[in-house]
Image (tube, helix red, strand yellow):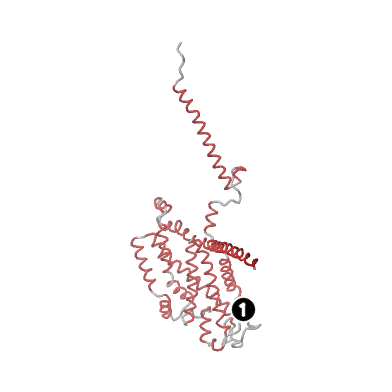
């Protein structure tokens, strides 16, 4: 009887057994390494495979990226802005009529009149409170108008492209080359009765071009992204793509442009009012400066008449600018590393100067002993 020879299949299986064991060992090794890496990131994985309750999720991290960091300049800006807004809302409830002229004229600050009175006997504190309300309303309305126009002439033009982009860009370029303040003066001078809404409209119409250029460039960049292309393939309309896909990604930039528009509108209203082209029958910080100039407050030494509105304009503009600087860190993430880089440079210089000082003291010690 011939010897039984092992079948080729049995030999093949015997050869594959060590390879299978090596493959299993390799898979187990990879699983252990990945598990160790996951435990290093989240120690709760070792306990039961669940994420730690306090671990930031992807969604939460994305939301945190859209919020400005808590910095001293952001805190100072919020305190200034919130304080002035609260003053504009609450102070008019506790002051006298800003047009009441029964007070003594040019009375300096005292217990009865915190900021004194004007040439006609108006209480300066009451006018400052009502002026804050009027200036903030003009700035808010003008900022919304400027933001709306910049969205139409910037984002819509950048996304749609073609002839629409060229036509809207032509209007934007024309508005850019026209000086803003002379244009506001010309438009305001033709209106005999200027309401607060009309002045805000003039300021908004003449202050949107710069923001439109920035938004247009960002929209042209976003329209080539994959999620925008996927929405086009899915048959979404252009209006919905702009509202759902593009605008949410431009929220920090839109907020920064809106704040800048509000600041420019308040400054523009103060300039127009100082020239006598402000709103009729409405008290603003600009009209207070105009009345102080026409009432010879500077020559009379009535500093309490023109300094408070100027300080309020400066403080509110400074607060909004500080908030805008914090929003810029979201738009340009490189700005976040600037403070840390500056601290590291100062620390490196300090550490570099320490060995030099210690070596000079060591070199001077033998000389002093010999003496």
Among all residues in the image, which is located at the extreme front? Answer: 370
**Badge count:** 1
Which of these two is toward me, 69 or 60? 69
Alpha-carbon neighbours of circle 1 within 10 Å: few (<14), some, or many (≥20)?
some
- Seen in the picture, residue 7 relative to 93 is either above or below; the reply is above
Quadrant in the rendering for residue 79: bottom right
Q: Is residue 162 left or right of residue 279?
A: left
Among all residues in the image, which is located at the extreme top? Answer: 1
Which of these two is toward me, 38 or 291? 38
Location of residue 331 in the rendering, given as x and y in whole percent from the top left corner:
48, 61
Location of residue 364 in the rendering, given as x and y in whole percent from the top left corner:
61, 66
Location of residue 84 in the rendering, given as x and y in whole percent from the top left corner:
57, 72
Quadrant in the rendering for residue 223: bottom left
- Seen in the picture, residue 370 relative to 273 is either above or below; the reply is above
Quadrant in the rendering for residue 105: bottom right
Q: Secondary structure at mark 1?
A: loop
Q: Which residue is mark 1?
A: 95
Location of residue 212 in the rendering, given as x and y in whole percent from the top left corner:
42, 66
Q: Is residue 365 left or right of residue 186?
A: right
Q: Is residue 128 left or right of residue 158?
A: right
Quarter of the image with the C terminus in it: bottom right
């Amino acid at each position: 009887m011939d010897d039984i020879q092992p079948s080729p299949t049995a030999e093949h299986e015997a050869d594959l057994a060590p390879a299978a064991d090596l493959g299993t060992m390799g898979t187990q090794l990879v699983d252990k390494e990945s598990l160790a890496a996951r435990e290093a990131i989240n120690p709760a994985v070792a306990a039961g495979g669940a994420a730690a309750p306090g671990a930031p999720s992807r969604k939460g991290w994305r939301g945190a990226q859209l919020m400005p960091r808590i910095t001293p300049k952001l805190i100072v800006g919020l305190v200034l802005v919130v304080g002035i807004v609260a003053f504009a809302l609450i102070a008019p409830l506790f002051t006298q009529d800003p047009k009441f002229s029964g007070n003594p004229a040019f009375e300096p600050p005292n217990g009865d009149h915190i900021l004194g009175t004007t040439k006609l006997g108006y209480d300066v504190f009451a006018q400052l409170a009502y002026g804050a309300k009027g200036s903030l309303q003009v700035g808010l309305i003008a900022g919304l108008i400027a933001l709306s126009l910049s969205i139409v002439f910037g984002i819509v033009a950048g996304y749609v492209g073609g002839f629409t982009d060229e036509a809207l860009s032509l209007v934007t370029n024309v508005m850019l080359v026209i000086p803003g303040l002379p244009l506001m003066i010309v438009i305001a001078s033709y209106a005999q009765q200027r309401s607060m809404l009309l002045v805000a409209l003039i300021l908004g119409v003449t202050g949107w071009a710069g923001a439109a250029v920035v938004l247009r460039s960002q929209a042209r960049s976003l329209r080539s992204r994959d999620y925008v292309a996927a929405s086009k393939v899915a048959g979404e309309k252009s209006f919905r793509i702009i509202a759902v896909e593009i605008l949410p990604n431009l929220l920090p930039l839109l907020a920064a442009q809106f704040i800048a528009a509000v600041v420019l509108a308040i400054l523009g209203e103060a300039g127009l009012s100082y020239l006598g082209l402000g709103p009729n029958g409405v008290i603003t910080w600009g009209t207070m400066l105009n009345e102080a100039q026409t009432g010879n407050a500077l020559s009379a030494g009535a500093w309490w008449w023109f300094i408070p509105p100027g300080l309020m304009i400066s403080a509110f503009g400074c607060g909004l600018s500080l908030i805008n600087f914090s929003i810029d860190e979201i738009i340009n993430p490189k700005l976040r590393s600037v403070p840390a880089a500056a601290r590291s440079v100062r620390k490196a210089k300090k550490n570099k100067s320490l060995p030099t000082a210690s070596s000079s003291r060591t070199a001077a010690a033998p000389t002093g002993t010999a003496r």
